[in-house]
Image (cartoon, helix red, strand yellow):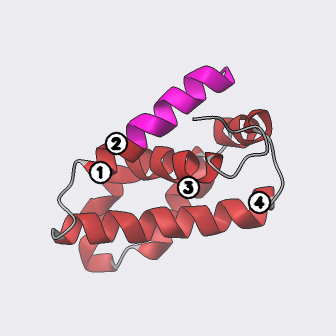
């Protein structure tokens, strides 16, 4: 997957979260999940990285992102797990903005 394709998916995730009204409980829940994935990205990638490095991590991230989302979601709200792809893309989209070669 190219960096351009990955960036497109990441931005779709950011926009998907933004389409949810901030006062809705779902928005707050999704935001907390994105925060949890960003925290894990910080541990896995570090603070200095390029978009290509981030795209490389993205390619193998489905399993660990699902684990982070599952571990960050209360048992009674496990239905929220259906949003894993959205959360994954939004978290990578947010984290991409800190890449050394990021350009809007």
Rounded to the nearest whole Å, what is the CA distance between mark 4 and mark 2? 24 Å
Disc 1 to disc 2: CB gap under 8 Å: yes
Going 45% across and 74% down the picture, which residue do you hit? 72
Which residue in the protein does label 2 denote? 15
Which residue in the protein does label 4 denote? 44
Rounded to the nearest whole Å, what is the CA distance between mark 3 and mark 4? 12 Å
Going 38% across and 73% down the picture, which residue do you hit? 73
Going 40% across and 42% down the picture, which residue do you hit? 13
Instruction: Judge the density around disc 4: few (<14), some (14-19), many (≥20) Cα neighbours within 10 Å.
Output: few
Q: Identify the element where label 3 is drawn.
A: helix
Marks 1, 3: nearer the viewer: 1
Instruction: Judge the density around disc 3: few (<14), some (14-19), many (≥20) Cα neighbours within 10 Å.
Output: many
Residue 7 located within the stretch drawn in magenta: yes
Which residue in the protein does label 3 denote? 65
The span shown in magenta is 1-13
Rounded to the nearest whole Å, what is the CA distance between mark 1 and mark 3? 20 Å
Rounded to the nearest whole Å, what is the CA distance between mark 2 and mark 3? 19 Å
Residue 11 located within the stretch drawn in magenta: yes
Left or right of residue 19, residue 71 in this image: right
């Amino acid at each position: 997957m190219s960096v351009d394709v990955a960036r497109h998916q990441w931005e779709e995730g950011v926009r998907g979260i933004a389409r949810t009204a901030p006062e809705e409980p779902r928005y707050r829940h999704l935001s907390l999940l994105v925060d949890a994935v960003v925290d894990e990205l910080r541990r896995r990638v570090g603070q200095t990285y390029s978009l290509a490095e981030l795209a490389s991590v993205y390619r193998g991230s489905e399993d660990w992102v699902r684990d982070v989302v599952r571990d960050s979601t209360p048992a009674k709200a496990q239905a929220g797990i259906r949003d894993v792809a959205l959360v994954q893309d939004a978290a990578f989209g947010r984290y991409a903005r800190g890449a050394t070669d990021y350009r809007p």
